[in-house]
């Protein structure tokens, strides 16, 4: 029994020694092929290993080998080109029914003469009376920047904001920005206009991308879209209303809802 | 006599079929011709689904990062483990083998095939490793699990992905199979192999700790159940049955293998300590990273039912539901004979714990599901065989068998569609934060301009993307030595011949281009692409090229076009 155990230990030791000897052979080979000294003369590529906590990767700076000449006769010399910085897995934007960005500026929207932003500085109410960040008044204050201090953050899941235009208008367009600092997509965006604050009389849904009716406002046929600095412009087709309500139910980054600005272009109802 | 072994021998005797002997089946376990053919077919299917067109799918950002890092190892024999990102070193070191075999000495000589053949190899190994568990699971279960591993869409898709996941799953399963074989033979070679596999798994990815903890907990639960069945003291007795020298062999082999890799083969001893302190980073990321935060049911929903837009329905529900059946069989010990129920229970607990842990962790990326999906596949093999055996009559048995075959065909179709049709389509649930095929257009256009530029491939290229969001372009532009990558517009450097930039920097870039081109000497820039180009869905890239290069390129194409006419 003892002998068997001893034999096993001997076998382990021999194997360990064998493995170590193999590694030494490899490491010897490695040391002979050590990468060229970062700043060795004659070497035009320099490697600096950054000891930064988050980026221990290479932050190499490369110099172009020969002067390059462009058609105008300019000579580009000693151009230091930063090497790519390694990054982690980027964010996924897997959203069903997502429209392709235009890739250019939005076409102009035409409205009758005299149509203007009738939502400017009008009162705003919300299902979340106490926003986590910002004030509801920010929605109609004319500030469309995505900077901190310019947006309102409402609670998670389905939330809505309602703007009282304080009079009946023929509404031609509704332009709004959720949060455009990142290319995120808000879910279940529904925009309705109505003549009463409870949205019972003369309710018109002018936009709905809730494809599975998860917000309970009916199945929408509009497409999801990515937030951009241009905002989302909706053709309201001259719908007559006093109240404008916008719903959303979280976004691709989290369950929260955000608004930067809402503009309603209309004319007093005839 | 061992009752399990006895019943298996009996089964073999009854079958009276011509059989073939597998070298690992030390107990004289024989394989029927049918089983051998099925295993061979499964292996061929595994290779056929994984190997073709490895360069077809655009490189994912993560793949490109690993590839460029591998370039340093290949060209300069340089590798340093980074405890904050990019996982363990086995992927990089093991890629040296196909690179050497293909005589590639530079990154420009390395192709997608050279890189992706590594996970393909381990994906096929994962299929073959099941042979080592055949006497514990039973031949029919082993064959079913082999087939399911070969055709699982997720297994196929990520076997063609140059990331660590498939290696991790293979090494972890290698440790389980070797450990099991050790319990059957008490041979120190298996103990050593268990250690080697554990070391390799540890040196592959930090999430190994989840698999390792699940293994330990599953082992404890299995032994506790065993001791309850066998009588008091069973647990202690089983633990004491392991020879201290053999246990030391496991630990020593694991530590040596892991330390060798993390220390870059003894050239960077700090790497060993880094492999320990990395867990602080990863625990923190699991709690705080919002970029990949998903609900607890993310993986299960993905496996059971996914449909995006007008895309097809994706489902591996067959595996999930059969795994549930297999779990019940393992716990109740009913429905199967001639199997090692301790092994089944270990796999059942291991899979359950892994599934729960991965679901609880908020940080989720789809490839992380492979670990517990493989456990589910093993249990699904058990469930499938039990369902057939428990069928009351021939008709029901035939019906269930046909249903399983039809579901298997559907899985194979999904595996094919996912890897060869929807390989970069967001409607495929396994396509995650993936570059679009537009990256090929970007690479082609840069190549075309280089052909007419006086400096050729030495021409200066600027890539400007905030947040370093330019991956995998460094991979596709690897043959151009003078590419600079910026996160914002650098107003000091003269503008390059070709500029690829995010729309976010366009105003600053236009200002710079105007300032650098004085009136009268202006060589304006024009669009490099004739259409909207995306790096990833919704992430647009714009290209600019000097007017004269653009003209030359157009002229270089025109004579050929005329000639063709």
Image: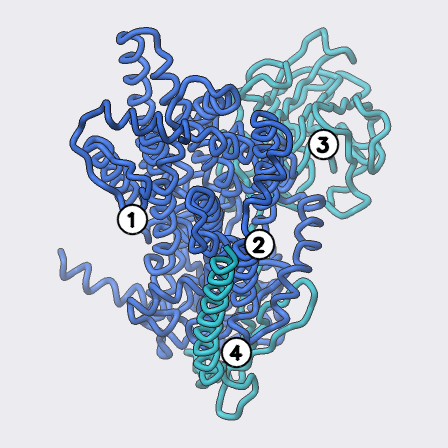
Q: Which residue is mark 2?
A: B244
Up/down of B504 relative to B136, above or below: below
Q: Is residue A197 visible?
A: yes
Label 2 to label 1: alpha-carbon separation: 43 Å
Up/down of A70 relative to B415, above or below: below
Camera-nearest label, 2 or 4: 2
Query: Chain A appears what colour?
Result: cyan
Q: Are marks 3 and 4 on the same chain?
A: yes
Marks 3 & 4, CB-CB < 8 Å contact: no
Label 2 to label 4: alpha-carbon separation: 55 Å
| Chain containing the residue with disc 1 | B
Q: Are marks 4 and 1 on the same chain?
A: no
Q: Position of residue B163 (x, y in %)?
A: 47, 53
Label 2 to label 3: alpha-carbon separation: 59 Å
Q: Which residue is mark 3?
A: A257
The number of discs equals: 4
Q: Position of residue B74 (x, y in %)?
A: 42, 72
Marks 2 & 3, CB-CB < 8 Å contact: no
| Residue A189 figure quarter | top right
Up/down of A249 relative to B276, above or below: above
Task: Tell me if B16 is positioned left or right of B67 in this view.
Answer: left
Q: Which chain is blue?
A: B
Graded by Cα atoms within 10 Å as few (under 14), some (14 to 19) or many (20 or more), the crowding at tag 4 reads many
Res B51 label:
1
Q: Nearer the viewer, residue B7 or B388?
A: B7
Label 4 to label 1: alpha-carbon separation: 37 Å
Q: Are marks 2 and 4 on the same chain?
A: no
Q: Compare marks 3 and 4 and give the one earlier in the sequence.
A: 4
User: Which element type, helix, strand or loop, lies under badge 2?
Assistant: helix
């Amino acid at each position: 029994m003892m002998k068997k155990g001893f034999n096993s230990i001997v076998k382990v030791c021999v194997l360990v020694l064998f493995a170590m000897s193999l590694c030494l052979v490899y490491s010897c080979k490695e040391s002979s092929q050590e990468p060229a000294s970062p700043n060795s003369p004659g070497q035009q590529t320099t490697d600096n290993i950054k000891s930064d906590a988050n980026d221990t990767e290479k932050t190499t700076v490369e110099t172009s080998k020969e002067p390059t000449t462009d058609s105008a006769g300019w000579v580009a010399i000693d151009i230091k080109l930063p090497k790519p910085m390694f990054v982690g897995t980027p964010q996924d934007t897997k959203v069903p029914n997502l429209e392709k960005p235009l890739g250019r500026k939005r076409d102009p929207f035409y409205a009758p003469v005299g149509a203007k932003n009738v939502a400017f500085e009008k009162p705003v109410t919300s299902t979340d009376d106490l926003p986590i960040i910002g004030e509801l008044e920010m929605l109609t204050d004319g500030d469309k920047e995505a900077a901190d201090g310019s947006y309102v953050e409402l609670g998670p899941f389905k939330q809505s904001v309602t703007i009282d235009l304080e009079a009946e208008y023929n509404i031609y367009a509704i332009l709004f920005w959720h949060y455009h600092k990142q290319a995120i997509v808000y879910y279940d965006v529904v925009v309705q206009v109505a003549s009463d604050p409870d949205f019972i009389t003369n309710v018109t849904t002018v936009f709905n991308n809730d494809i599975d009716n998860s917000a309970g406002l009916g199945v929408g046929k509009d497409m999801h879209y990515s937030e951009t600095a241009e905002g989302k412009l909706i053709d309201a087709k001259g719908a007559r209303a006093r109240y404008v309500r916008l719903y959303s139910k979280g976004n691709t980054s989290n369950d929260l809802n955000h608004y930067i600005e809402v503009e309603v272009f209309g004319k007093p109802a005839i | 006599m061992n009752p399990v072994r006895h019943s298996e021998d009996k089964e073999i005797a009854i079958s009276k079929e011509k059989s073939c002997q597998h070298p690992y089946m030390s107990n004289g376990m024989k394989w029927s011709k049918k089983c051998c053919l099925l295993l061979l077919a499964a292996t061929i299917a595994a290779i056929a689904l994984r190997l073709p067109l490895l360069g077809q799918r655009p490189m994912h950002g993560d793949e490109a990062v690993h590839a460029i890092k591998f370039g340093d190892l290949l060209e300069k024999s340089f590798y340093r483990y980074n405890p904050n990102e990019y996982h363990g070193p086995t992927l990089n070191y093991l890629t040296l083998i196909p690179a050497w075999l293909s005589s590639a000495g530079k990154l420009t000589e390395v192709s997608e095939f050279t890189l992706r053949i590594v996970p393909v190899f381990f994906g096929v190994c994962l299929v073959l490793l099941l042979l080592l568990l055949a006497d514990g699971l039973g031949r029919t279960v082993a064959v079913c699990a082999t087939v399911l591993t070969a055709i699982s869409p997720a297994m196929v898709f990520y076997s063609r992905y140059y990331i660590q996941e498939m290696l991790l799953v293979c090494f972890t399963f290698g440790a389980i199979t070797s450990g099991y074989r050790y319990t059957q033979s008490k041979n120190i070679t298996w103990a050593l192999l268990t250690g080697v596999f554990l070391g390799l798994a540890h040196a592959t990815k930090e999430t190994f700790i989840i698999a390792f903890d699940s293994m330990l907990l599953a082992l404890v639960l299995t032994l506790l159940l065993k001791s309850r069945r066998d009588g008091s003291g069973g647990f202690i007795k089983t633990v004491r049955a392991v020879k201290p020298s053999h246990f030391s062999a496991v630990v020593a082999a694991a530590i040596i293998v892991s330390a060798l890799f993390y220390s870059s083969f003894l050239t960077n001893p700090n790497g060993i300590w880094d492999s320990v302190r990395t867990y602080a980073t990863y625990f923190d990321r699991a709690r705080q990273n919002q970029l990949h935060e998903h609900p607890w049911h993310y993986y299960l929903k993905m496996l059971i039912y996914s449909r995006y837009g007008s895309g097809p329905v994706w489902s591996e529900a067959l595996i999930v539901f059969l795994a549930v059946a297999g779990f019940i069989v393992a716990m109740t010990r009913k429905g199967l004979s001639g199997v090692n129920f301790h092994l089944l229970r270990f796999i059942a607990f291991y899979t359950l714990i892994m599934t729960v842990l991965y679901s609880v962790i908020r940080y989720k990326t789809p490839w992380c599901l492979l670990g517990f999906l493989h456990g589910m596949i093993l249990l699904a093999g058990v469930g499938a065989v039990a369902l057939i055996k428990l069928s009351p009559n021939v008709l029901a048995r035939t019906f269930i068998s046909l249903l399983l075959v039809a579901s298997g065909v559907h899985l194979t179709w999904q595996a094919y569609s996912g890897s060869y049709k929807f390989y970069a389509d967001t409607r495929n649930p396994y396509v995650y934060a993936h570059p679009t095929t537009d990256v090929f257009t970007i690479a082609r256009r840069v190549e075309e301009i280089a052909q007419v530029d006086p400096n050729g491939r030495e021409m200066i290229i600027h890539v400007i993307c905030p947040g370093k969001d330019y991956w995998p372009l460094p991979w596709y532009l690897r043959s151009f030595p003078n590419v600079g990558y910026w996160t914002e517009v650098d107003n000091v450097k003269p503008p390059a011949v070709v500029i690829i930039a995010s729309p976010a920097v366009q105003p600053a870039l236009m200002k710079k281009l105007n300032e650098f081109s004085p009136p009268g000497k202006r060589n304006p820039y024009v669009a490099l692409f004739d259409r909207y180009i995306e790096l990833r869905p919704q992430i647009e890239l714009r290209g600019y090229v000097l007017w004269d290069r653009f003209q030359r390129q157009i002229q270089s194409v025109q004579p050929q076009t005329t000639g063709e006419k």
